[in-house]
Image (spheres, rainbow, N blue to C red):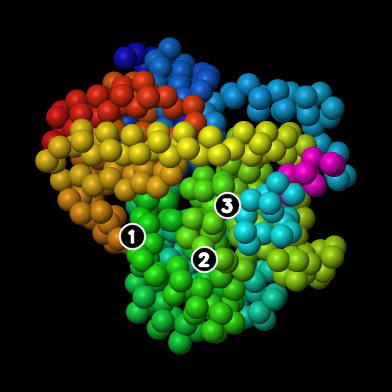
Amino acid sequence: MSDTRSSELYRRALHVLPGGVNSPVRAMRAIGRDPIFVERASGAELTDVDGNVYVDYVCSWGPLIHGHAHPEILEAVITAAANGTSYGAPTAGEVELAEAVSARMPAVDMLRMTSSGTEASMSAIRLARAATGREKVLKFAGAYHGHVDGLLAAAGSGLATQGIPSSPGVPAGAAAATVVVPWNDEEAVKVAFAEHELAAVLVEPYPANMGLIPPAPGFLELLRDLCTGYESLLVFDEVITGFRVAPGGAQELTGVLPDLTVMGKIIGGGLPAAAFGGPAALMERIAPAGDVYQAGTLSGNPLAVAAGRATLALLDEQAYMSLSTTTRALADGLREAAGDHPISVTSTTGLVTVFFAAEPPTDYASAAACDLETYGAWCRALLARGVYPPASQFEAWFPSTAHTADHIARTVEAAAAAFAEVL
Ligand SMILES: *Cc1c(COP(=O)(O)O)cnc(C)c1O
């Protein structure tokens, strides 16, 4: 496979973009290679600037649940663009998207749109602090909620990928307002509640930024009970799980209802959009209905709203059945391809992780103990065979409704060959 043009672009990029990229994990450093520059993509397939074609399992890290350049989503965006790209005034589309979201998400009656998941989780925390009159927020090691100052402690995702425990430049006060405990650790959570006045518990209900590590049975229920008992708010970060693991996200899948929900990725259908929402009694604290300030020049942008609406409209029962079948075929196929090697595969509808460990990790510490070097070598071997995996042990694979049985079969074959090469 040639990489002449990618290499040339990367050399130029290093002079004008820190690390050559606009978001760290794209640099592929964790798997020991240079980044691949993309020319175009369609459905489940990505073509790089050197003409190499890959079956894509990153799909923009989650937004593209229908794959790339879906004709109906494209048409919605083109139509919206022709009518003007932004007005700074409300539109019908925003009302319709908000109605569609609240119809799907059990705990969302009212929502505020933002342009990124980072802004949405930052604003949800501000609201939780205002509503409770408390400052501290509990989060889990290895969970990612965007690059908000106070939420970067032990933040998984790109930080884990780069081996950054937490970022310099975060004020001590912001870090001190965050309490971090291990995922799935009931005792540590109980101690944290007893020791701190918590405004909120911020949780990825199916964490996918330390690889996919589902909650232990009863763990989310425990968080719900403790939040209710201590009058703290339970905030689900469903930026990845929303509209993916079930139409109503992890809150529908598990039946555990949060007080506030953070959404992103799929809600913008591949354009910049995110949101946070909850019951009217809480959400009407947000300006201009209430006194908690929150705003955005491009929030509810007509192009992103059009892409989000078209994406949700395509997510019917048939789409979830197909996504579930595809996910199961991918997870089972990867397990089979690994044979007797010490590999474990976790999955739920729309999410898969291949851990280089004999037992599936249960928290960030056990995920970090995986054989990261061999994971990297395996990813390089997959790329050489036309399969594009997440370039980090700490990110999930994102199958889409555009992945066919043939894509899965090609992937499993490439995976078996790649395992044989590196193990
Ligand atoms: C991606 C992500 C975010 C941040 O969203 P951005 O749009 O990248 O700011 C927050 N939470 C989770 C769970 C995510 O996966």
**Image quarter in which the C terminus is found:** top left
Q: CA distance from mark 1 to mark 3?
A: 26 Å
The circle drawn on residue 256 is 2
Residue displayed at 40% across by 83% down = 191
The location of residue 89, given as percent across then percent down, is: 88, 44
Q: Label 3, secondary structure: give it.
A: loop
Residue displayed at 59% across by 38% down = 316
Residue range in magenta is: 91-98
Residue 140 as seen in the image, left or right of residue 302: left
Q: Is residue 48 above or below residue 276?
A: above
The location of residue 29, given as percent across then percent down, is: 35, 38
Could you say which is closer to the camera, residue 254 or residue 212? 254
The circle drawn on residue 364 is 1
The disc, 1 or 3, on the residue closer to the chain's N-terminal end is 3
The disc, 2 or 3, on the residue closer to the chain's N-terminal end is 3
Residue displayed at 19% across by 25% down = 417
Q: Residues within 10 Å of mark 2 (few under 14, many from 20)?
A: some
Name the amino acid, label 3.
Gly
Q: Is residue 215 magenta?
A: no
Q: Label 1, secondary structure: give it.
A: helix
Name the amino acid, label 1.
Tyr
Judged by depth in the image, the label closer to the viewer, 1 or 2, is 2
Name the amino acid, label 2.
Val
Residue displayed at 57% across by 47% down = 247
The circle drawn on residue 248 is 3
Residue 415 as seen in the image, left or right of residue 158: left
